[in-house]
Amino acid sequence: MEPWRFKFLGYQMGLARPAFLALCVAGALVGALALWLALRRRSRVRAFITERLVDKLAPGTSRWLPATQAGLQGLGLMLFGLALAQPQCGTTSELAKRRGIDVVVALDASKSMLARDVQPSRLERARLELTTLLDELKGDRVGLVAFAGDAFIQSPLTSDYSAVKLFLRAVDPEQMPQGGSNIGEALLLARQVLENADRGSKERVVVLLSDGEDLTGEVDEAVAALKEAHVQVLTVGVGSEQGEPIPVYNRRGEFVDYKKDSSGETVITRMDRAGLAAIAEATGGEFFYQPRGVAMAQVLERVEKMQKSELESRVTVRYDERFQVFALPGLVLLVLGMVLPSSWRRRSA
């Protein structure tokens, strides 16, 4: 439920969680029910015992003690309901500044990333590790470029990590319009995303996740362009250097066979350590590799050490919380309702 905002006597007021007002209604019903039962109790006693004998035969049968007890508990619940609804009164303006760097992730979505030398597959493991990276980033803007034979901007630079995760889940090698692997085009497109950013950061990074196999040979041009723009490339090797066949699946996602070349031989895909390391070295970045995994923890450490810039500043309005005004009285009333006896007896002399 959306917060309620309104003005009262010229003050900005609101309820951050108005759904908890239902507890106020429950408190009123509980109090009313307990009050009715307390009053009915005395009436039922009088139905069997005459008025003048009530105090002798049923001493301590009070009408008002249980009624008071029920009223205190019901009112306490109502006040707690108001406190949980988070009443707010008054506002404070604050200048919020967000600092970070700009990061574009270039994710290899070619069919070689379906190889399973990294479990459950190269692509799935890269996706999982990228999600972890997004959970750890604080204030940085992230963009996403997916590539196979062509490269596409999946997400522009944004601090909305949930949106990036959504785009990340949509990356599928089977949906890429052109097969192959064009790392050079992916790097050039990542540079374009960084150049088009509003109020770009001082340090800008491209994180390339790939097995390194490039079938077009356009990497040198892209590396030169990134070096000229002072953009570091952190390359993350995915896969094994020993090689792995590429599985082929049918439309139902069932394994059918391994990919074959034109001569009928099984295609083996290997991680190109030398190629990925050369890209990182030429741009002042770093190559990361973890056998049977994806070395995103080391990438995060490198990113956190970089110089943060002010990416955004805006005035935000914060509502002043007033739940304490209701929570403390509610607690006192509930305690009084619990310790107050529902009947009394005179002590004999």
Image: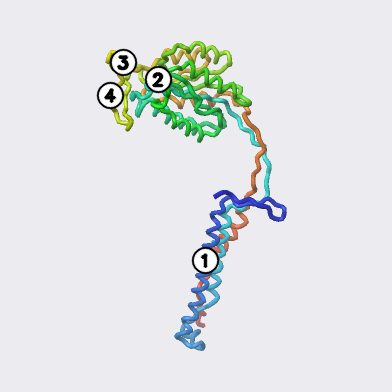
Residue 30 drawn at (x, y percent) = 51, 66
Tag 2, which secondary structure? loop
Q: Where is residue 225 in the image (x, y as percent from the top left)?
A: 55, 13
The residue wearing badge 4 is 257
The residue at 35%/19% (across/down) is 240
Gap between marks 4 and 2, in whole Å?
18 Å
Measured Cα–Cα span from mark 1 to mark 2: 67 Å
Q: Are marks 3 and 4 in contact (CB under 8 Å)?
A: no
In the rendered image, the vertical position of residue 81 relative to residue 348, given as above or below: above
Seen from the viewer's position, the closer of residues 222 and 274 is 222
Give the distance between the C-alpha atoms of the residues marked 3 and 1, in whole angstroms. Answer: 76 Å
Q: What element carries label 4?
A: strand
Tag 4: amino acid:
Asp
Q: Which colour scheme is used?
A: rainbow
Of tags 1 and 2, the one toward the viewer is 2
Q: Quickly name the residue at label 3.
A: 261
Q: Name the residue under label 1.
A: 29
Q: Which of marks 3 and 1 is nearer the N terminus?
A: 1
Give the alpha-carbon distance from disc 3 to disc 2, as whole Å: 14 Å
Type of the residue with mark 1: Leu
Q: Which-is-in-front pick, marks 4 and 1?
A: 4
Who is closer to the viewer here, 231 or 303? 231
Q: Nearer the viewer, residue 54 or 307?
A: 307
